[in-house]
Amino acid sequence: MIEKSIIELHELIKSGLLKPETLIDEVYENIAKYNDKYNAYITIRDKKDVLADLAMASDKKTSLLYGIPYSMKDAYLTKDVRTTAASAILEDFIPPYSATVYKKLQSAGALLIGKANLDAWGHGASTENNDFGPTKNPWDDSRVAGGSSGGSAAAIASSMCKFSIGEDTGGSIRNPSAWTNTTGLKVTYGRVSRYGAIAYASSFDTIGPMGGSAQDLAIILETIAGVDPYDATSSPEPVPNYLQGQTLKVGNLTIGMPKEMYSHGLDPEIKSSIEEATVEFKKIGVKVVDVSLPIAEIALAAYYLIAPSESSSNLARYDGMRYGKGRELFTTENIRRIMIGTYALSSGYYDAYYRKAQKVRTLLIQKYEDAFKKCDVLLMPVNPGMPPKFGQLVNDPIQNMLADIYTTSINQVGVPSLALPAGFSKSGLPIGMQLVGQKFAESTILNLGHKYQSVTHWHTRKPKL
Amino acid sequence: MAKTKQIITTNDVQHVAQLANLPLDPAKIPLYQKQLEDSLEYVRIVQTLDLDNVEETVQISGLTNVWREDVVDPSRTFTQEQALANAPSSLNGFFMVNGIMKE
């Protein structure tokens, strides 16, 4: 049942053919079978608490998300439910208040099942760098699920929830989505309130939905988007009806292929899968043109200065006094990022590193503006290669950085991007691609993604568990 | 591209760790020294670009001066018990913290 779309589940629940309790049972059965193997969840709620939430939501039966079981990356405060950021520093932390995104999903009648694994404090692209054990990829358990929202992606791929809420600072939603054959949306900066989210890099952090299809994500985004008085950076831009947006025609749209984003060691199988996807886009009437976006390397360099700088500042609050344990419990990866950030911000190096990176950010915005003069949407790879084996990324800081080469510029510019399945390698590993839109054009990329998923079948494939 | 390597010394590592209030395992200092040097080597691309006439971007929300009324929001206040619930150490309703001065 859980593999059906949110709309199908809603229709079944509404007509009485499916009880939400049955869906919850199915999810808990899958958790019992698979969570030990894949380690997708850090905290799993008691089923009786979920059933109590369901009883409380009985007035929300018209909501499309009523009774739908979901997970959240363990980077969001959930009142009375442990929140760890996958770090030993917060292993006993019980939040006294809730993130806005959690409150909105509660109001819609969705049911939180558990808190999903990640790289501690969001620092990583493999969900290996944490204090709760690595998440394994349901497509091949000798490989990582990506990161940092790897637990969310693995939980969706192994049917341990219907959808998840991830966080994307430099690719943390898109990277694991692409490596697990799931669909994930990095939203425009400010589209979703960050109140109650544990900050990594505040000027890049975005909260977005991850799930089985662009249609499911449209429903979730409409629920969680919008201005929030508790987050001054949340945008007053009106929230459109994303589901209705997916009924619009796409024949007037142009996709730009930035040729420079197909180099930097891109796996040839990923390249050919995306080229095959352009054939499908053309079939549904979309124009495909070449554009130029020669920024990947400088974007990655600027990202790995600005993100650690902001992170070193954000993580300074963990002093082991008001809540949480001591700073000696940061992982090696955390310590390195904090030190790089502190170095880049320190007297004598601020101008040479941090200020230069902020200027690069301006260049990136200009280059994206230039590219968007020739097209509505950019089509790019998400990851340079297939999901690595354990230890390949976590032990090599430079390889760890390079995993983000196609994703970080998008966070610095603030535009939205939809990662979606584009095929499989000969060895049976999932391949993803991303549709990058202009600011607040989530409707356009969700519509294009939905049209693509209406004529292809990649996203419906599930791993043999 | 400038190829002169930014040299990171053991002292640099210890200085940065002190600034960031990070208790370092001395055995790991050579590791951090190398990792910092490698990482800075990569990000130094930004120093090779002509950026003299480029403005800095600090945020991309497009918003300026977002105000709220200066009133207490009771839904966002904690009781003393809630505020202290996660404290590793508290006494008589206060947080216990490490001393910063010696007698």
Image: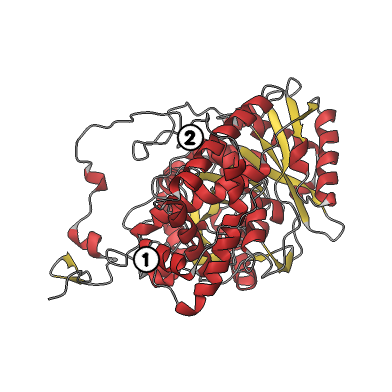
Vertical placement of A96 versus A293: above or below? below
**Residue positioned most to the bottom:** B27
The residue closer to the viewer here, A293 or A345, is: A345
Hey, which quadrant is residue A452 in on the image?
Answer: top right
The x, y position of residue A95, in whole percent, is 35, 59
Question: What SS does tag 2 mark?
Answer: loop
Which residue is labeled 2 in the image?
Answer: B57
Return the residue found at the far top.
A252
The relative height of residue A299 versus residue A251 in the rendered view (above or below) is below
- Are discs 1 and 2 less than 8 Å apart at CB? no
Residue A188 visible at all:
no
Image spot of residue B68 (x, y percent): 27, 32
Q: CA distance from mark 1 to mark 2?
A: 29 Å
> Badge 2 local density, few (<14 within 10 Å), some, or many (20+)?
some
Q: In this rendered view, identify the residue nearer to me: B90 or B37.
A: B37
Provide the residue designation for mark 1: B18
